[in-house]
Structure formats: structure tokens, C-alpha cells
Image (tube, rainbow, N blue to C red):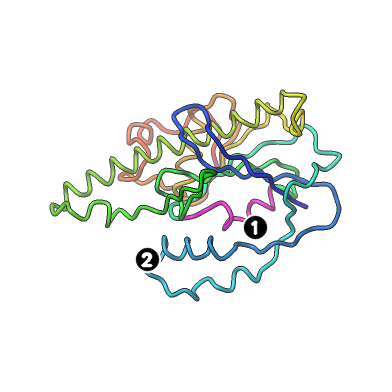
Amino acid sequence: MACSSQLGGTVTRESPRFPVRVYYPAAHGPLQQPAYIDRSVWRAVARAVLGRAPGFIFSHLPHIQIDLAEDAPLHPSAENLPVVVFSHGNSGLPAIYWTLISNFVQAGHVVICPEHNDGSAASVRLQDGSTHDYERPDEKFAGVTDPAERKLLQDKWRRQQLKRRVAEAIASMDWLLRNVADKSTRWYQAADPNQLAYVGHSFGGATAVVAAEQDPRASVCAAFDCWAEASGPIDPKMLDTGISRCPTL
């Protein structure tokens, strides 16, 4: 079974505040059977992916229930578990990756999922109540009429987003490892600091690859449909020299 707890607040590195959800193997017991994603999430994803989408596009998703319990106790055998920091794709949110995340949890991993507050998430709500919605590049640079100039600005913006995403991913790993070493927290000795991975999809795949190269603690990386084209967010110099520090799938 899997359950999650909410982490929000100021983090170190270059990151401003951003929400993080932590999924982990939980003790057996009654489950709340929450919806796969609630109304606010599916509407945010519909707006981000499809623009002015009809309200019914993803309206069936809240009727799907998942095996999740908020703030349930860790499973008694949850000690020295491998850690995965998972980075969501452009216009997405961690919640839409439940199948992938739950597979990691059922295999005995702790999965940390930052909601990237760089303009690439469908919508991010902070503890102070402020909301940051997806930033569409066609709207952000609508005033730039020259196609070549617009492309340069978009590429620069994407690289800036990637830098911030990487900082948020590494800061999420920092947070868990601090708690793993702290006897006063629920995470004490729950995770193994020697089994750390960065995983992501699309823009999150690019995030995972760069984070794993920058964070010497990472032992493995997996990128699904990685955004690694020549004009993508990863520095072309890094693409030219190759991924060398961390074994990457």
C-alpha cells in the first residue's frame, strides 16, 4: 500500500517555495480510497495541455479511486529503502503519474515528488494560498514577432526552467536525507542514503538527467521520453560530452 504526506515551505538551494509529496510503503489498515485526481487537478491539467478545453474532458478521473492513505504510519519493515526523486513532465503534476509512482512504492521505494514551481506545472498552490498556473510559451512571448528571436527567447526560458527544476529536485533529496538522519522525525533510518535515484518524464526526464549528473550522491537515473533534443532545455555542451557520471536509463 502507499500513502503520502505533504511537505511545503522554504527550501535551500536556488528554489523558492514549492510543494512536495512523499509516497512510501504504509502500514496495513483501512484506506481512505481517495480519487485518482480531484476536480481542481484535472481542470488545471486540461487547461495546461489543451488550452481552453471543455470541462468534461477529464471529468471521469475523480471517479477512479486509488490505494492511498494520507499520513499513514510507515510499514514496520520500512527501513533503508531506496529513494526516488520523481520529476513530472511539462504541463503535468505528480498526481497524474500515480501508476508509475505506486509501482515504485509497491517495490519498496520512498518516492519524493516535487511540484515544480517554474511555470511548467499545470498549477501549483502554496501554503500561503497563492496559485501559480502553467505558463504557455505562445502567450509568454506573444509580443515577439520575429520567429528566430522568439525561438531564442523560448530556448533561454526553458533552460532557466530546467535550472530551477534541478535545484528543486536536489533540494527535495536534501530534505529527505536530513530527516533520515534525524531521530526526531518519522523518516529516521527509513531510507538508504546510498541508494538514491532521479527519475522523470519528458521535461522531468531532462530534470532527472541533469540532477543526477550534478548530485554526486545519486547512484542511478531513469528518464522516460526524455526532452533531450538539440534545441531542448539541456545545455548542448552536456549533450555533446555525454552522460558520464551516473548510470542512466
Q: Which residue is mark 2?
A: 51
- Disc 2 secondary structure class: loop
Who is closer to the viewer here, 152 or 165?
A: 165
Q: Position of residue 102 (x, y in %)?
A: 69, 53
Identified by mark 2, the residue type is: Gly
Foreground mark, 2 or 1, reads 2
Residue in the picture at 59% in, 69% down:
61
Q: Position of residue 128 (x, y in %)?
A: 51, 43
Q: Quadrant of residue 197?
A: top right
Q: Which residue is mark 1?
A: 99
Residues at circles 2 and 1 in contact by the CB criterion of under 8 Å: no
In the image, the segment drawn in magenta is 92-104
Side of 145 where 23 appears, left or right? right
Q: Is residue 98 magenta?
A: yes
Q: Residues within 10 Å of mark 2 (few under 14, many from 20)?
A: few
- Disc 1 secondary structure class: helix
Q: Position of residue 99 (x, y in %)?
A: 64, 57
Q: Is residue 130 magenta?
A: no
